């Protein structure tokens, strides 16, 4: 018996990194997976995003666990594409029990050097994309009257300021406000809404940010790790996926509006 037997999870930003780890971990616990990603680069951030080959690998890993997997190519910034993605998931699986809002970008620049395009893209992907996913999933959850789980990836940067990341911090703080408001609106329907707050995670975003900022990857990793009180440089994607699994399962059925930090002690400083 898996913790998520009989459930369906829609995961955004699922082609690689944390999103893939969420998909595989939840599939291992019995969930069917709808994996959504844009699968092409954008003018911003200044590094490559996940492609179709990486999406294929995510789907194959889920299927090797004996679970069904649906790949959806969509831009989380588009209302029409997100509405269609939710409809496609329901058409394929009949339900959505778990929504993991994970699609996100990061980049670095001083606040006064950020362009309007960079600012708008950061907010649209990291915050508007979460709202749109919830906008189209929540009515389905309400109609089913079976409760639900919504998990939103924020960051330690959604709990504190970080130099060179004002637009990223603004987006991740916004996620907390969105989630806490949704938690209040949905509690009576047994739909929980919580945020995850990782420190630096070992994904392609780290190398991408370093390259965009003309830094050596080790230099960026060392900068991140100096904020940890525990002896670790970067967290593993499975550390975050296991936390999300707890929030998705019945083990956390009365936890809502919570900000769960997985941060190697970063928020202690």
Image: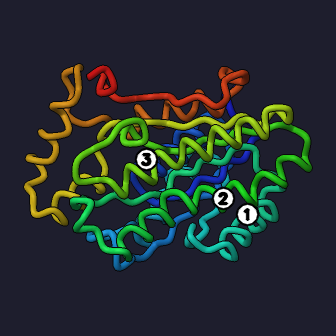
Task: Determine whether, in the image, residue 192 is placed left or right of residue 120.
Answer: right
Cβ atoms at labels 2 and 3 below 8 Å apart: no
Q: Nearer the viewer, residue 52 or 38?
A: 38
Instruction: Tell me the distance, in whole angstroms, between the alpha carbons under discs 1 and 3.
Output: 21 Å
Residue 14 seen from this side: no
Horizontal and vertical percent for residue 203?
Answer: 31, 50
Q: Secondary structure at mark 1?
A: helix
Horizontal and vertical percent for residue 222?
Answer: 12, 39
Query: Which residue is the site of mark 2?
Result: 133
Query: Which residue is the site of mark 1?
Result: 86
Task: Determine whether, in the image, residue 254 is placed left or right of residue 230.
Answer: right
| Residue found at the very far bottom of the displayed protein | 43
Cβ atoms at labels 1 and 3 below 8 Å apart: no
Instruction: Tell me the distance, in whole angstroms, between the alpha carbons under discs 2 and 1.
Output: 8 Å
> In the drawing, what numbered circle is on residue 18?
3
| Relative height, residue 183 to residue 108 (above, below) | above
Q: Residues within 10 Å of mark 3 (few under 14, many from 20)?
A: many
Horizontal and vertical percent for residue 173?
Answer: 47, 45
């Amino acid at each position: 018996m898996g913790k998520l037997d009989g459930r369906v999870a829609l995961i955004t930003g699922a082609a690689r990194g944390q999103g893939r780890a969420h998909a595989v971990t939840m599939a291992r616990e019995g969930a069917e997976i709808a994996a959504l990603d844009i699968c092409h680069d954008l003018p911003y951030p200044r590094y490559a995003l996940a492609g179709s080959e990486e999406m294929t690998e995510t789907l194959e890993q889920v299927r090797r666990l004996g679970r069904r997997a649906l790949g959806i190519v969509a831009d989380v910034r588009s209302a029409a594409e997100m509405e269609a993605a939710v409809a496609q998931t329901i058409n394929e699986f009949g339900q959505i029990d778990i929504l993991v809002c994970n699609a996100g970008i990061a980049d670095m620049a001083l606040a006064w050097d950020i362009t309007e395009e960079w600012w708008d893209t950061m907010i649209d992907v990291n915050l508007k994309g979460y709202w749109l996913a919830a906008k189209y999933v929540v009515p389905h959850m309400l109609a089913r009257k079976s409760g639900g789980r919504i998990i939103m990836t924020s960051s330690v940067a959604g709990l504190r300021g970080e130099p060179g990341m004002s637009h990223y911090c603004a987006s991740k703080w916004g996620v907390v406000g969105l989630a806490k408001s949704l938690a209040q609106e949905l509690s009576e329907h047994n739909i929980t809404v919580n945020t995850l707050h990782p420190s630096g995670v070992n994904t392609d975003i780290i190398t991408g940010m370093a390259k965009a900022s003309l830094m050596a990857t080790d230099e960026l990793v060392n900068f991140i790790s100096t904020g940890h009180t525990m002896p670790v440089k970067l967290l593993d994607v499975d550390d975050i996926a296991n936390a999300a699994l707890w929030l998705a399962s019945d083990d956390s059925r009365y936890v809502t509006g919570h900000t769960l930090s997985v941060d190697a002690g970063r928020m202690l400083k």
